[in-house]
Image (cartoon, grey):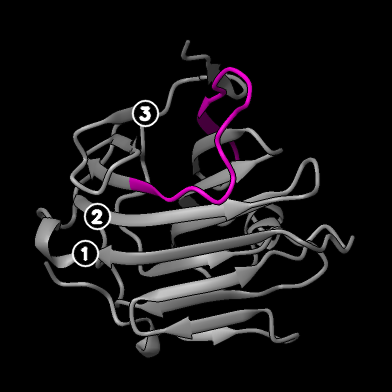
Amino acid sequence: MALQDFATYVEVDPNSHITVTKNRVDQEMHEDEDAYVYKDFGVGHFGDFEHRLTAQYNTVEEYSYFWFHVLTNDIDDMKGLLDGGKAFLGIFFWDNAYLVLEYFDGTTRYQDGYAPPFPFIPFETPFYFTIRRSGSTYECEMYDDAARTSLVVALSLEGVTTNTFRYLMASNTYNLGVDITGDYLYVDNLDLEAYRANLGASGANVGDRGDLALVVVA
């Protein structure tokens, strides 16, 4: 296991809402600022890969965004990437309940989502993720144990056409210009090297998947 040292990442934190330690990022998620933690791995670094991390969120607001593990070729908050037509792969918790896997090709958003039955995805509970990309397939598995034997949900998207990515953003805000307080995310134990596959994969054409597909798991 080769855990990422977040002390080597760049921290953009205009209002002191982020705390970075060696293997962990803690962030108050405010939706009136651009705040994120990222690292430049070099042009074309992320092609095919398999990464592992732990993430946990807490929210007191509806419709809050908690973005983490974002791969992109540009640096901005998530709304800035979308408005600017900048491609990315990313994951977010949303609206007290959902987990969403997203590929944005610069024009169209492609998503697969998980909406569990009440009481939804528990707050203040760590979840253990395995995230992979192989060719045009992008996948995320969420487990409730560190050994990754108890699967909560598996999400998947087909048709990723952006070949490679340069930056990894451990966490990121979605700046809507409206302050939301009391929301919190942490990401830790990000392991890239032990699971990284071949780089430079090329994707297939993206079909029209439409809007968010929420998969309800009983």
Residue 10 visible to the viewer: yes
Q: Residue furthest right?
A: 178
Q: Amino acid at mark 1?
A: Leu
**Bounds of the magenta segment:** 107-128
Going 71% across and 73% down the picture, which residue do you hit? 34
Place residue 22 in its image quadrant: bottom left
Q: Is residue 116 above or below residue 200?
A: above
Which residue, given by chain and number where applicable, does mark 3 sit on?
A: 152
Q: Position of residue 171 (x, y in %)?
A: 52, 65
Q: Is residue 107 left or right of residue 32?
A: left
Q: Position of residue 63 (x, y in %)?
A: 77, 41
Circle on res. 49: none
Number of dots carrying numbers: 3
Which residue, given by chain and number where applicable, does mark 2 sit on?
A: 51
**Pick the front one: 127 or 10:** 127
| Disc nearer the start of the sequence (3/2) | 2
Going 89% across and 60% down the picture, which residue do you hit? 178
Q: Residue furthest top?
A: 218
